[in-house]
Amino acid sequence: MLNTRDILETINMIENENLDIRTITMGISLLDCMDSDCGKACDKIYDKICRYAANLVKTGEDISKEYGIPIINKRISVTPIAMVAGACPGADPIHFAKALNKAASTVGVNFIGGYSALVHKGFAPGDYALIKSIPEALSQTELVCSSVNIGTTKAGINMDAVKMMGQVVVDVAKATADRDCIGAAKLVIFCNAPEDNPFMAGAFHGPGEPDCVINVGVSGPGVVRAALQKAGDCDITAVADIIKRTAFKITRMGQLVAQEASRRLYVPFGIVDLSLAPTPAVGDSVAHILEEMGLECCGAHGTTACLALLNDAVKKGGVMASSHVGGLSGAFIPVTEDAGMIDAARCGALSITKLEAMTAVCSVGLDMINIPGDTPPEIISAIIADEAAIGMVNSKTTAVRVIPAIGKKAGDELSFGGLLGGGPVMDVNRYSPMKFINRGGRIPAPMQSLKN
């Protein structure tokens, strides 16, 4: 039973500690929209999305008003479009991007994810054309997000796809240079991409998912930091226990919203993603949690250990609070979206090298990092390969979302506004990996993949 103290504590979390539901994401399968005629397929996609998601935004707003819980985003994820586009060879995939954007605009969601391809073991029909079209698709749409999965623990890493994606990232940034290179902020390159991730820009509705499902992503870095602040000087075991208890409370709220949205929309409840998703707002930072543990600044020696503790405790606390946990589930470290990370990058305490080490123990990977606009494609490909290797060997999801800041150099600033934030352009290692990247082929799966 809830007591008065629990209720008041939750109200305080919402009003003073930035607690919110970051997103309700409706996953929609488009497998039944395949057609050899591209125009007909796009019409089917638009009709199905509008039919299924017609009440998504209103439902989220109604739940938010009735329960007093802020629900920041309402989003849609769909079947990887490369799979749908493969049924109409020769058609320009950009038509699908425009159909997605039109549908998302009609139903009023913030973003729609799934302009995606799964190429971890090679290219199927539709994959190559879709990847090549990503720069045009993201420059000609506002709401569409794209992702490409280039590796898994079971399959290894597709280095031909890695090489392609380095160039695609550069091309996307150039195509949207007049908008602060925003297109690159809507493109994620994954290893071990989950099929039920509710967070953009990497969300897609995997082929193993139901026809339609509701997934919820929670937030709450400010709540965790406040709990540690109140605890004062305690040992590390106590720190872990405090985070677990706090994560439990945050996730219970996510479970409530997910079940209520599922009931009202007559759509199955999928998962709650436990990830602590920061924002540029003061008091809503993962970096500040790490500093509350005792670091002078995020990026100092000890940061990886603190992040490992945080990630583990969030999972342990959250998993007991929800009937189905999935997605990414942990702690995000997107530099431009986290006020503490931005400050750490500006003062030089946080480097890309340190961020790469941190990704071995937390959710996702090198996320929302501004890099110099003249960074060669092969260096971006090598950054992708390094991050994918961490994911592949450790059987975890890793990803790269870097933004080449066209016309800017290290130390300059790039700003997107809103939840995407902004921050300094961070320097990269300029020694060339070109010969390695140009070899192509596939990095074999590690020994730990042989579990059958």
Image (cartoon, rainbow, N blue to C red):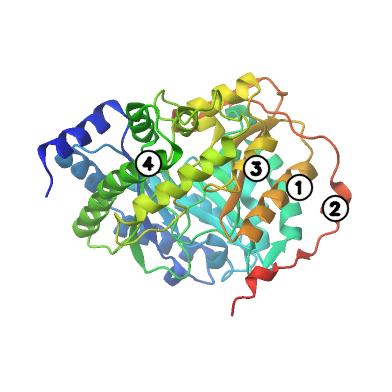
Q: CA distance from mark 2 to mark 1?
A: 8 Å
- Of labels 1 and 4, the one closer to you: 4
Q: Quadrant of residue 372?
A: top right
**Kind of element beneath mark 1:** helix
The mark that comes first in sequence, 4 or 2, is 4
C-alpha span from label 4 to label 3: 22 Å
Circle 3 sits in a helix, a strand or a loop, which is it?
A: helix
Residue situated furthest right in the rendering: 435
What is the spatial separation of the Cα atoms under label 3 and label 1, in whole angstroms? 15 Å
Whether residue 180 appears in this view of the structure is yes
Q: Mark 1 and mark 2 in contact (Cβ < 8 Å)?
A: yes
Residue 128 image offset from top left, x and y in percent: 68, 61
Looking at the rendered image, the disc whose residue lies closer to the viewer, 4 or 2, is 4
Disc 4: which residue:
243
Tell me: 445 left or right of 401: right
Crowdedness near tag 1: few (<14), some (14–19) or many (≥20) residues, C-alpha within 10 Å? many
Q: Dot 3, crowdedness within 10 Å: few (<14), some or many (≥20)?
A: some
Q: CA distance from mark 4 to mark 2?
A: 42 Å
Residue ID for mark 1: 382
Mark 4, secondary structure of its residue: helix
Where 280 sits versus 71, above or below? above
Check disc 2 and report the residue beneath it: 436
| Residue 310 left/right relative to 267 | right
